[in-house]
Amino acid sequence: MTNPQEVSLVTFLRSVPIFGGLEGRSLDRLIERLQEQRFEPGEVVFHEGELGRTMHVLREGEVEIVRRASEGDEVLIVRLGPGETFGEMTLVELQPRSATVVAKKRTHTYSLTSMDLYNLYRDDNYAYVIVLQNICRMLSRRLRKADGRIADFLVLQEKQLQGEPPKEASEGKPKAGKAGGKAASKTTSKAESKAEGKAEGKEEATTEGETEEKAEGKARKR
């Protein structure tokens, strides 16, 4: 009789991209090599710079990938959840860990070592090729994303060096100019209206004065 827990594990592993394409005996051979590990919140899975030979697949929980910058500050790179993997770079290159991984919640993982992968190569060449190909695809996707972020950062840095104002500031200036222009035109029109009113008043006063003088002159002649 099939164990429900084993069925659940098989279903879960099929949904993990790094094991995509494995079926039947190949998947069973992989499951035989997986090791369950559990971590409490705040526990470090591994440290940046230490030697590692283990990849982890998250079954439950959440972890943070943290890297130390050149100035010494720790920078959060990404948060990972169920179905995602970390540490896979150690399976394709013998280099120190590139980042620190910390559990943020109670975390349950399945781990696979570089030796497990080598033994898989000896026992099931097809399964080995599938896993390795999926790792390469994952790393390629992450590299593409990193390239996009680097390009955006370089463009922004170049604009700052050239002294170009931010988009919001440059868009705001014309609006302020229009508002100022409207205010100035209103002030000018008011001043012109006042000047015209004064001129009209003077003309009316002059006309009235001339009329009165003419009337007085006619009265004297009579």
Image (tube, rainbow, N blue to C red):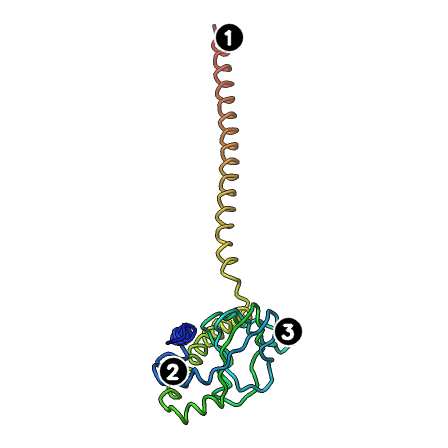
How many neighbours does mark 1 have within 10 angstroms: few (below 14), some (14-19), or many (20 or more)? Answer: few
Residue in the foreground of this view, choosing between 150 and 215: 150
* Mark 2, other Cα within 10 Å: few <14 / some 14–19 / many ≥20: some
Chain-order first, disc 1 or disc 3: 3
Q: Position of residue 63 (x, y in %)?
A: 54, 71
Residue 37 screen position, x and y as percent:
54, 77
Residue farthest to the bottom, as pictured: 122
Q: Is residue 2 above or below residue 33?
A: above
User: Which amino acid, mark 1?
Assistant: Arg
State the SS at label 2: helix
Mark 3 and mark 2 in contact (Cβ < 8 Å)? Answer: no
Residue 204 in picture, x, y percent from top left: 49, 22
Q: Which residue is mark 2?
A: 27
Q: CB under 8 Å between callouts 2 and 1? A: no
Instruction: Find the distance from the CA under tag 2 to the CA under tag 3.
Output: 41 Å
The outermost residue toward the right is 72
Task: Between residue 190 and residue 5, name the one nearer to us.
Answer: 5
Per the image, the residue denoted by label 1 is: 220
Query: In the image, which disc is placed on residue 73?
Result: 3
For the residues labelled 1 and 3, the Cα–Cα distance comes to 106 Å
Disc 3 marks a residue whose amino acid type is Asp
The quadrant in which residue 68 appears is bottom right
Residue placed furthest toward the top: 222
- In the picture, which quadrant includes the N terminus? bottom left
Look at 45% across and 92% down and name the residue there: 118
The quadrant holding residue 71 is bottom right
User: Which residue type does callout 2 highlight?
Assistant: Leu
Pair 2/3: label in front: 2
Q: Nearer the viewer, mark 2 or mark 1?
A: 2
Position above or below: 61 against 184: below
Q: How many marks?
A: 3
